[in-house]
């Protein structure tokens, strides 16, 4: 891990306010870095209600609000993260963590990364025969 990465790891650790749950490692690999910041990044996202904000866009409670469509990009996620006051370095870290968790676009973030989302429950309600115990 580079010194810059260490600084960024600390940044997420402080913001998640979770103490020392993430392990620091001397490895240079990006994967180690993602691993190290992952739980703190997800903690910050939960705290800032990132997933429910994204869910509100893709599965609005109000049926009159038009649903966002996923463009196989992180456009909406980036909008929300920017709205939360994150700079481009923060956003890059968050997207790296989301990708490592199987979220490679806005809708996959809600399906694969969020603990729960209306979008995901709609999906599973529509496909009870495919119910996956992993969820
Ligand atoms: Zn998508």
Image (spheres, grey):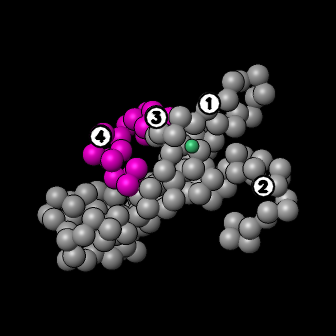
Up the image or down, 104 lies above or below 75; here it is: below
* Residue shown at the point (62%, 59%) measured from the top left: 115
| Pair 4/1: label in front | 1
Where disc 4 sits, the SS reads: helix
Which of disc 4 and disc 2 is earlier in sequence? Answer: 4
Q: CA distance from mark 4 to mark 1?
A: 23 Å
Disc 2 to disc 4, how far (Cα)? 34 Å
Mark positioned earlier in the residue sequence (2 or 3): 3
Residue 48 vs 115, above or below: the answer is: above
* Mark 2 lies on residue: 124
| Magenta highlight range | 76-96
CB atoms of marks 4 and 1 within 8 Å: no
- Residue 68: mark in rendering: 1
Q: CA distance from mark 3 to mark 4?
A: 13 Å
Q: Is residue 23 magenta?
A: no
Callout count: 4
Give SS at disc 1: loop
Distance Cα–Cα, label 1 vs label 2: 19 Å
How far is mark 2 from mark 3, CA to CA? 25 Å
Residue, disc 4? 88
Q: Which quarter of the rendered picture does the C terminus lie within? A: bottom right
* Residue 80 forms part of the magenta stretch: yes
In the image, is the residue at mark 2 within 8 Å of ligand 1 by its beta carbon?
A: no
Please rate how many residues cluster around mark 3, counting C-alpha atoms within 10 Å: few if below 14, some from 14 to 19, many from 20.
few
Residue 133 in view: yes
Q: Quadrant of ligand 1?
A: top right
Tell me: 57 left or right of 29: right
Q: Is mark 1 within 8 Å of ligand 1?
A: no
Most extreme residue toward the left is 3
- Residue 118, given in percent of the width and then of the height, sits at 72, 46
């Amino acid at each position: 891990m580079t010194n810059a990465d260490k600084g960024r790891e600390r940044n997420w650790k402080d913001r998640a306010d979770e103490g020392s749950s993430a392990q620091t490692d001397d490895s240079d690999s990006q994967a180690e870095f993602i691993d190290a910041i992952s739980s703190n990044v997800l903690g910050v996202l939960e705290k800032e209600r990132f997933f429910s904000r994204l869910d509100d866009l893709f599965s609005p409670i109000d049926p009159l609000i038009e649903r966002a469509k996923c463009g196989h990009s992180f456009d909406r996620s980036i909008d929300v993260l920017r709205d939360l006051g994150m700079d481009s370095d923060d956003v890059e870290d968050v997207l790296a963590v989301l990708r490592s968790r199987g979220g490679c676009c806005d809708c996959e973030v809600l399906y694969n990364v969020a603990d729960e989302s209306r979008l995901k429950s709609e999906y599973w309600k529509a496909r009870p025969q495919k119910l996956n115990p992993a969820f």
